[in-house]
Image (cartoon, rainbow, N blue to C red):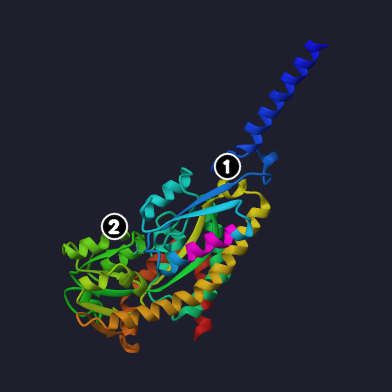
């Protein structure tokens, strides 16, 4: 009898230990190899969110707000850890890190995504958007839907489009008023093939390198100028290294928040819903904030005595559009009829 009791006790201790190891100790960030039968019971998910800009920028603040909202909505079962300023990866490195599951969320500039999916060059078409309302319609409408459908073939789950604002030219050589003024200048750009072609059209030299190397490159005079949003130009002190700025609004700098689709699929549906809810709230907030913030940064940059600012007039803007029409001709077939049809609809609606 004593022997039987000992065997039963031994078995009970064994089962209890197995339960503790198997179920209780599952706090590791392992969104890919999840036991589907246990999903959502007591899994804690850690999602690393990498981005390259400062914490006090629209994207930086949006990422932190998103992390806070996800924590609240999932009662802490999903923890978003934000890594700003490119501390983990530069923008292109983020794609690789996402695929290796070293990070789980990224929000690269659309011009960086265009390297992976040529259809996304559509957003780099110069002077595509006249104002923020048009951008909103594009991101919320069919155009945005088609872009997310397209990137899905590369196994990215598109979570949201995030705003920054329009890009402006800055440089140290001369005021930029007409396209000819860019001739011979060396300008840092993001690596989108369309942007490379655009600067070739201007007779300028373009260089693509990570965002967080711009300040040093300007300081060492390795490049003459850049194109970026006022938020980025101000938050990284880039304007301090430049003599001229043209408020050109020639391109829109927006972002897409992306996850790897396999990682997304391993999250329990109720967490996916909470993440989407949090994302919608943040995206809506960001839309207004990014616009206002870029206006405020213009005021700040305007008060810098060392920067000479030119505002493109409507007729100057038309000159630029004309000079850049070969870019539209080259990229229409690459972007494809379906997406271009949405572009024409948007432009028609604004007329
Ligand atoms: C960003 O806003 O994410 C960076 C943009 C850039 O690389 O110029």
Magenta span contains residue 131: no
CB at disc 1 and ligand 1 closer than 8 Å: no
Left/right placement of residue 198 relative to residue 26 reads left
Relative depth, front residue between 78 and 291 = 78
Mark nearest the camera among 2 and 1 is 1
Q: Position of residue 294 (x, y in %)?
A: 39, 77
Q: Position of residue 211 (x, y in %)?
A: 32, 60
Residue furthest to the right: 1
Q: Which quadrant holds residue 312?
A: bottom left
Q: Is residue 238 above or below residue 46?
A: below
Q: SS at mark 1?
A: loop
What residue do we see at 34% from left, 80% from top?
298
Magenta span contains residue 70: yes
> Mark 2 or mark 1, which has the lower sequence index?
1
Q: Report which residue position mark 2 lands on.
A: 209
Rounded to the nearest angstrom, the CA distance separating label 2 from label 1 is 37 Å
For the record, the magenta segment spans 62-71
**Magenta span: chief secondary structure:** helix
Relative depth, front residue between 188 and 206 = 188
What residue do we see at 26% from left, 62% from top?
214
Q: Report which residue position mark 1 lands on.
A: 27
Ligand 1 positioned in quadrant? bottom left
């Amino acid at each position: 009898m004593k022997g039987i009791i000992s065997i039963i006790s031994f078995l009970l201790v064994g089962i209890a230990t197995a339960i503790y190891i198997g179920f209780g100790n599952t706090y590791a960030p392992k969104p890919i190899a999840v036991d589907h039968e246990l999903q959502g019971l007591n899994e804690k998910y850690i999602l690393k969110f990498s981005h390259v800009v400062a914490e006090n920028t629209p994207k930086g603040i949006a990422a932190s707000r998103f992390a806070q909202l996800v924590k609240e909505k999932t009662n802490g079962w999903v923890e978003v850890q934000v890594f700003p300023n490119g501390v983990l990866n530069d923008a292109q490195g983020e794609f690789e890190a996402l695929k290796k599951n070293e990070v789980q969320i990224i929000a690269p500039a659309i011009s960086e995504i265009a390297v992976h999916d040529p259809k996304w060059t559509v957003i780099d078409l110069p002077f595509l958007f006249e104002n923020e309302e048009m951008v909103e319609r594009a991101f919320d409408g069919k155009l945005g839907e088609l872009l997310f459908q397209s990137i899905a073939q590369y196994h990215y789950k598109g979570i949201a489009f995030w705003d920054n604002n329009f890009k402006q030219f800055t440089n140290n050589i001369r005021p930029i008023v007409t396209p000819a003024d860019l001739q011979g200048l060396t300008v840092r750009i993001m690596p989108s093939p369309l942007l490379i072609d655009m600067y070739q059209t201007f007779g300028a030299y373009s260089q693509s390198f990570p965002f967080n190397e711009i300040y040093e490159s300007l300081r060492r005079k390795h490049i003459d100028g850049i194109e970026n949003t006022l938020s980025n130009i101000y938050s990284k002190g880039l304007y301090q290294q430049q003599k001229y700025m043209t408020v050109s609004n020639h391109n829109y700098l927006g972002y897409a928040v992306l996850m790897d689709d396999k990682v997304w699929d391993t999250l329990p549906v109720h967490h996916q819903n909470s993440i989407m809810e949090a994302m919608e709230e943040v995206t809506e907030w960001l839309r207004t904030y990014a616009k206002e913030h870029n206006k405020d940064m213009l005021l700040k940059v305007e008060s810098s005595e060392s920067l000479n600012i030119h505002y493109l007039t409507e007729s100057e803007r038309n000159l630029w559009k004309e000079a850049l029409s070969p870019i539209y001709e080259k990229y229409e077939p690459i972007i494809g009829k379906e997406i271009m049809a949405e572009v024409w609809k948007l432009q028609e609606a604004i007329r």
